Image (cartoon, rainbow, N blue to C red):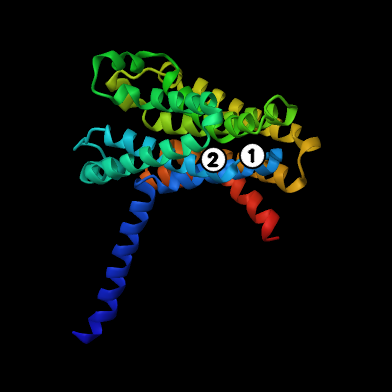
């Protein structure tokens, strides 16, 4: 028996680490970290000066609230192979608590940033539009019928909150670098969203959720996808006169990495690939930028 103790301890440690990792990803802490690092990159690349601490905290609590709200409304499907869906079904009370904490925190920091209430309300409205079709009320179900809506709503939210909103609060929006960086981020996030929507294609069709993705053939969808990546690369290169080499390199490397993972993502539906790796790809350029600036 004593010989088996190290193995048992190892297995127990692996199970514990897996549970912690699943909690970190499925409770939306991971996607929240992605949002914060993307905002850090925006602040640094565009040299924005504003009340960054309160804005970071506002986004932290708002993301926790919105994503837990979204997954709380997602019904369990016993036939689904997604562990994320089953995890959400088992932890609905916890997600409701996280949603409440997020709502309280975001309301408090909204008040701290109340001078920019109109810009912040725009972010809240876009965020609500994405999850609204899941609300069990007939007056909101029509949103699921809007063509192109699903993918564009999510892309607009991420681009607006992590790029446009900081520039608006800093009163620094109408500049060429802001426009180019906004186009870059929109194009990259849109490409990543296409990968998600392609995975959910059949499920969306069965649920009657319409989007650009459900209307296109695979060949046309790939054209849109690679055109989006090309736009992301071109706008990153166009930022060369306005940003330093580490910033430009980080943007281009993230586009290249997304292109290289396309085949894997197109044929593999694993939750970890999507909710950890591809979600993480949204902040990949920020991570590379951070490493190039502070570690090299």
Q: Is residue 257 visible?
A: no
Label 1 sits on a secondary structure element that is loop
Mark 2 Cα within 10 Å, few/some/many (few <14, many 20+)? many
Res. 153 in view: yes
Placement of the C terminus among the 4 image quadrants: bottom right
Residue 236 point in image, percent of width and height: 70, 35
* Residue at the image position 46 percent from the left and 33 percent from the top: 195
Q: Position of residue 237 (x, y in %)?
A: 74, 35
Point 43% across, 19% down: residue = 149
- Is 115 above or below relative to 14? above
Q: Position of residue 74 (x, y in %)?
A: 27, 33
Earlier residue among tags 1 and 2: 1
Q: Report the Cα–Cα distance between label 1 and label 2.
A: 9 Å
Numbered tag placed on residue 50 in the rendering: 1
Q: Are marks 1 and 2 in contact (CB under 8 Å)?
A: yes
Q: Quadrant of residue 243?
A: top right
Q: Secondary structure at mark 2?
A: helix
Please give the name of the residue rendered at 63% of the width and 50% of the height, measured from the top-left corner: 288
Q: Is residue 244 left or right of residue 194?
A: right
- x and y percentages locating residue 105 in the rendered image: 40, 42
Q: Does residue 269 appear to the left or right of 135 in the view shown?
A: right
């Amino acid at each position: 028996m004593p010989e088996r103790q190290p193995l048992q301890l190892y297995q127990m440690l692996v199970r514990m680490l897996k549970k912690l990792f699943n909690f970190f990803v499925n409770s939306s802490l991971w996607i929240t970290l992605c949002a914060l690092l993307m905002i850090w990159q925006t602040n640094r690349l565009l040299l924005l000066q504003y009340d960054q601490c309160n804005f970071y905290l506002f986004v932290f609590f708002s993301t926790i609230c919105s994503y837990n709200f979204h997954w709380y409304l997602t019904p369990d499907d016993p036939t689904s192979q997604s562990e994320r869906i089953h995890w959400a079904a088992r932890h609905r009370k916890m997600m409701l608590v996280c949603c409440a904490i997020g709502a309280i925190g975001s309301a408090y920091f909204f008040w701290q940033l109340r001078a920019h209430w109109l810009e912040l309300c725009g972010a809240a409205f876009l965020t609500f539009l994405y999850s609204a079709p899941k609300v069990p009320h007939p007056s909101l179900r029509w949103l699921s019928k809007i063509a192109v809506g699903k993918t564009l709503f999510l892309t607009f939210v991420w681009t607006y909150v992590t790029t446009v909103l900081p520039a608006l609060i800093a009163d620094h929006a109408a500049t060429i670098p802001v426009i180019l960086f906004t186009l870059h981020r929109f194009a990259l996030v849109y490409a990543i969203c296409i990968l998600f929507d392609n995975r959910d294609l059949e499920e969306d069709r069965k649920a009657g959720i319409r989007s650009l993705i459900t209307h296109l053939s695979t060949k046309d969808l790939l054209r849109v996808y690679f055109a989006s990546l090309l736009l992301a690369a071109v706008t990153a290169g166009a930022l060369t006169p306005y940003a330093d080499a580490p910033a430009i390199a980080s943007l281009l490397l993230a586009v290249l990495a997304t292109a290289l993972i396309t085949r894997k993502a197109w044929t593999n539906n694993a939750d970890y690939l999507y909710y950890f790796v591809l979600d993480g790809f949204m902040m990949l350029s920020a991570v590379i930028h951070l490493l190039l600036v502070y570690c090299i």
